[in-house]
Amino acid sequence: MSFLDEFRHHTWEQMGERIYTKREQDVMRALHKQGRRDLDDFCALISPAADPHLEEMAQLSFRLTRKRFGNTTQLYIPLYLSNECHNICTYCGFSVDNKLERLTLDRDRLLQEVEEIKAQGFKHILLVTGEAMRKVGVDYLAQVLDWIRPHFASITMEVQALEQADYERLIGRGLNSVLIYQETYNSHTYNSYHPKGRKSNMAYRLETPDRLGRAGIHRIGIAALLGLEDWRVDSGFVALHLGYLERRYWRTRYSISLPRLRPAAGCQPPNVIVSDRNFVQLICAYRIYNENVEISLSTRESPAFRDHLLKLGITSMSAGSKTEPGGYTVSDEALEQFEVNDARTPAQVAAMIRSRGFDPVWKDWDIVLE
Ligand code: SF4
């Protein structure tokens, strides 16, 4: 049994109909429901019928987030280990068909990056690579964990989809959480965005969070890439996936991200425009649907918008991000995955968080507390 079995009971068209047929009374029922909300409530909250109720959604999302998470926002930073990749993903700067210089950090270069990052105060780190099994396979990732484990309170990876045994090995070396984004749940178009490489196996990717759950990972992050397909329908599937995972792997924590497609050299522009208003609606809908899920915001968004979103349901933010390997010691835009939109320093982001009455949290978890 895996999510694939549940996924096969839901077509893209049915999910769309489930969302677009919602009316005002469905939205009001979802907003005023006592107790846990279900997928139909989520569909109502992301439907066009909910748009006039955005203010009420924002107020409820704010209250639920403060009740569960307090006035805190966790800060983390991505560390790109490599931009090697053997896949073609039409939206990504690391795609194998893009002519850019490729770089994989060795131990010395990696530890230089680590020193830069630690000097900025970070205790939570997100390790990112492309998908090149020979250069940045499981052996390399295990070695990286050995090198950096003493320096950080928690380590997250956003790397290629792996086998359960690989995850177990990495968890044993200190890996705490994994982000694995489906990008789109539209099986009609998935392969048009992923025409080459292991990522073109949609079923394998859909089952990856199951392998993580069985491996006993502490936290799993899921998402759809906003800008490929209808964001409402893709988000309906993310909510379906989240509900499935929480029921099945109930010891694991979950997070949702909202990556909105950003310009990258040699890549396609967004197919679908997700407006700022849509984006706010989606954050609020996730929070009202699930009071416990962590919601993460990256530097893909602009400073003013990130400042505004802080109060609406977000629980963690990246800051000071570089999206190229080695970027914290020698910045080279020619190597980057995408352009960041918020170039403020971590100290500036932390000051903004404090100025809005929140506490920036550099460390809220440690392996010894598990
Ligand atoms: S999204 Fe990941 S797998 Fe696809 S090209 Fe970029 S780095 Fe490679």
Image (cartoon, rainbow, N blue to C red):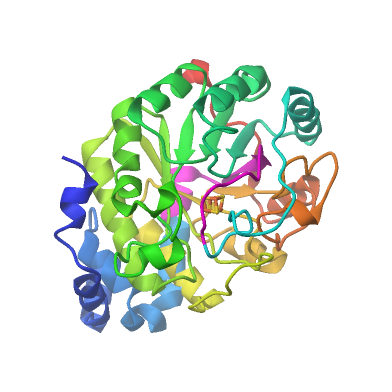
Q: How many numbered marks appear?
A: 0
- Residue 133 location in percent, x, y? 51, 35
> In the rendered image, is residue 129 in sight?
yes
- Which quarter of the rendering shows the C terminus? top left
- Residue appearing at x 55%, y 40% in the figure: 132
Span highlighted in magenta in the image: 64-89
User: Which residue is at 63% across, 41% downward?
Assistant: 76
Question: Was residue 77 drawn as part of the magenta stretch in this picture?
Answer: yes
Q: Quadrant of the N terminus?
A: top left
Q: Is residue 238 left or right of residue 94?
A: left
Q: Position of residue 161 (x, y in %)?
A: 42, 40
Task: Tell whether 266 sits left or right of 292.
Answer: right
* Residue at the image point whose x is 48% and y is 59% from the top: 62
Q: Is residue 286 left or right of residue 265?
A: left
Between 165 and 30, the one nearer to me in the picture:
165
Residue 222 seen in the figure: no
Give percent across and percent down for residue 287: 40, 57
Find out whether residue 363 is within the magenta segment.
no
Query: At which x and y percent is residue 92?
Result: 58, 59
Q: Residue at x 30, y 30 (%)?
A: 251
- Examine the image and state in which quarter residue 148 appears: top right
Q: Please identify the quarter of the rendering in which residue 61 is found.
A: bottom left
Q: Is residue 314 above or below residue 153?
A: below
Q: Quadrant of residue 113?
A: top right
